[in-house]
Image (cartoon, grey):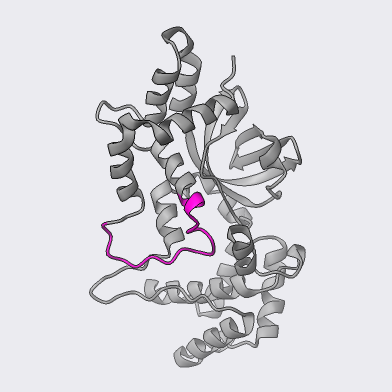
Amino acid sequence: MAFTQRQLDEVVSWVADAPSLALHRKFARRHYFGEDDPRPVEYWGGAGDPTSRRRRFLGYFLFAYRLPDGRNPAEAGIEELYRDSEREVPMRAVRGARYVMAAVRSVLPGRAVYLEVEKERFELRHHAWSSQIPAKSTIFAHLVPSRRGLWVLGPGWLEMPMRLGPGVRSNLSNLQPDPIFLERLLQGRIALDEEERPAPPQDATLREAASRMSAEARLKGKDELILSAEAWEALVWPYLMHADITSLSEEIMRRAGNETDIDELNMWMALANNIWNTTPQPDRGGKTANELVRERWN
């Protein structure tokens, strides 16, 4: 017997509105969105859309939040919606839920999406979702086991318009984030230390990003990082074609003289990421990563 998408959707609906969970939803929402955090919030693109925020919160609340008795709200939903004799399969399913950052291995439009985290494979048979998700993109999602080899999709999934290079994919199981970390990332929050760290550069065009890199490189005497926008585009394109930001990072490190100071290294990587995000992608209609993010969330 399999746990189905319809059954999960019923549990989600109950958890979202159950009066008995109202105080827990309020407390969890405050924690999830960091309402007591003094750092400013500026969501990426359309990630601040109320519907998107609510769905992401529901995914966290269903599976990651713990009630005082140790259950998560999804388990409470199963106990409310099913008789004792019917609970075993759905209870086992929600207890096996996973939150993953996964690469989209392949898609059968109108039928299924196939995800992977290193050697793990996840097959989701979902008509609507499989018509939206492009192959080789990167997905953050709550997945719930259905039956052997098959999974159903939890609320609040997110597609990031980037492809993972071979180096990242081979180490993906060690890079799994939690939902709150991703929400802070989407919120664009910056650290408020005694010496406040600057937000990562986010230029609108490759020309602006190249100028920013060149200005810093001239200041630090890093001549190999002083390039025109056209030269940066020519340099980055081969890495874009193979979605290999890892090898690009190695090239940047070499050009920076194999810098060992961690703050300096982080600065060069942030400037390089700014260039990556503003370089037109030849296999995505000449659109940049920044433009693809705005399209996805607007």
Magenta stretch bounds = 36-53
Q: Is residue 278 left or right of residue 55?
A: right
**Residue that appears at 70% across and 41% down:** 130
Q: Is residue 84 magenta?
A: no
Q: Nearer the viewer, residue 119 or 229?
A: 229
**What is the quadrant of the N terminus in the image?**
top right
79 in relation to 155, above or below: above
Q: Nearer the viewer, residue 127 or 124?
A: 127
Looking at the image, can residue 96 be seen? no
**Residue 238: percent from left, percent from top:** 72, 68
Q: Main secondary structure of the magenta part?
A: loop
Q: Residue furthest top?
A: 85
- Residue 255 occupies which quadrant of the picture? bottom right
Looking at the image, can residue 23 be seen? yes
**Residue 131: percent from left, percent from top:** 72, 44
168 in relation to 73, above or below: below
81 in relation to 31, above or below: above
Q: Nearer the viewer, residue 126 or 136?
A: 126
**Residue 70: percent from left, percent from top:** 29, 27
Q: Is residue 49 magenta?
A: yes
